[in-house]
Amino acid sequence: MWYKQIKAFAEHFKVLVFDIRGHGETSKNMPIDVPEYTFDLAADDIKQLMQHLGIKKAHFCGVSFGTMILQRFLTKYPSMVKSLIFGGLITKYSLIHRLLIHLGDKILMKIMSKDTFYKLCAYLFMPKKRHAAARKLFIRESKKVSSDAFIKWWKAVRREKIFELLPSNITIPTLVLMGSEDYVFLKSSRLIHQKFKNVTYVMIEKCGHVCSLEKHKIFNEHCIRFIQGIKDKLQVQNHAVNE
């Protein structure tokens, strides 16, 4: 899902892309797994990976479901976060979100296969013709996730209140990138200002939920400029201290 970012980001930064539990190489190389997935577990996995690689602090970028994981990571390990980039941000569940979760839990999950359910979500999140390429990739990649992993993550999403658990007055530099046609999450994404005080909020026109794929050049430019701006500020501060 990050193939349109890796090369662009690697020209400026050291880049680490990891697969969460049940996805990609992780699913192939973790024969011993846990019976239940939680966002706490996902946050701990990131921490352990960073410690294993000797990374004390990093800039983080997550899209959609990844923004939920990063919010939990921030709650647990704020000292390891230099900055945050949220694409297709998911915050507090609105009434509509909870109705969709309830519908999926009580009806759709019982009559649909995992792949059919993912396809339905893809069309819900990215309904327009110009969203087709991102929608196709989303559907294709979802087929690589096992049914067991999907059910575990679905249960985690169903019971979670990620945004509500965040502390207030978070001052970590944060960039939010939202598609103007992200009909499911756009309105609730503005709640970010309730918790974060150092936020740059960017609307990408004629774009759906997965803005990192649909408008990858614009997405990449904003991300690179944002992180470079933070690095420049730190260099100025360090220079002032040294003087």
Image (cartoon, rainbow, N blue to C red):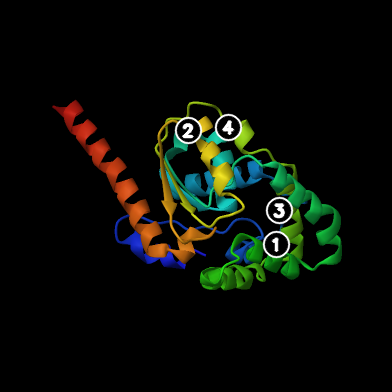
Disc sitting over residue 153 in the figure:
3
Residue drawn at x 56%, y 59% is 19
Q: Name the N-terminal-most of marks 4 and 2.
A: 4
Where residue 166 is drawn, which disc sits there?
A: 4
Sequence order check: which comes first, mark 3 or mark 4?
Answer: 3
Indicate the amino acid at tag 2: Phe
From mark 2 to mark 3, how far is it between C-alphas? 26 Å
Type of the residue with mark 3:
Trp
Q: Are marks 4 and 2 in contact (CB under 8 Å)?
A: no
Q: Tell which tag, 1 or 3, sits nearer the viewer.
A: 3
Q: Earlier in the sequence, mark 1 or mark 3?
A: 1
- Dot 1 and dot 3 residues touching (CB under 8 Å): no
- Quickly name the residue at label 2: 196
Residue displayed at 63% across by 64% down: 29
Among the two numbered marks 2 and 1 on one chain, the one whose residue lies closer to the N terminus: 1
Q: Is residue 146 above or below residue 222?
A: below
User: Which residue is under mark 1?
Assistant: 31
- Left-right relation of 111 to 146: right
In-front residue for pair 167/103:
103
The residue lying toward the viewer, choosing from 153 and 186, is 186
**Closer to the camera: disc 3 or disc 4?**
4
Q: CA distance from mark 4 to mark 1?
A: 33 Å
Q: Amino acid at mark 1?
A: Pro
Percent coordinates x, y for residue 23 in the rendering:
62, 62
- How many tags in the picture? 4
Disc 4 secondary structure class: loop
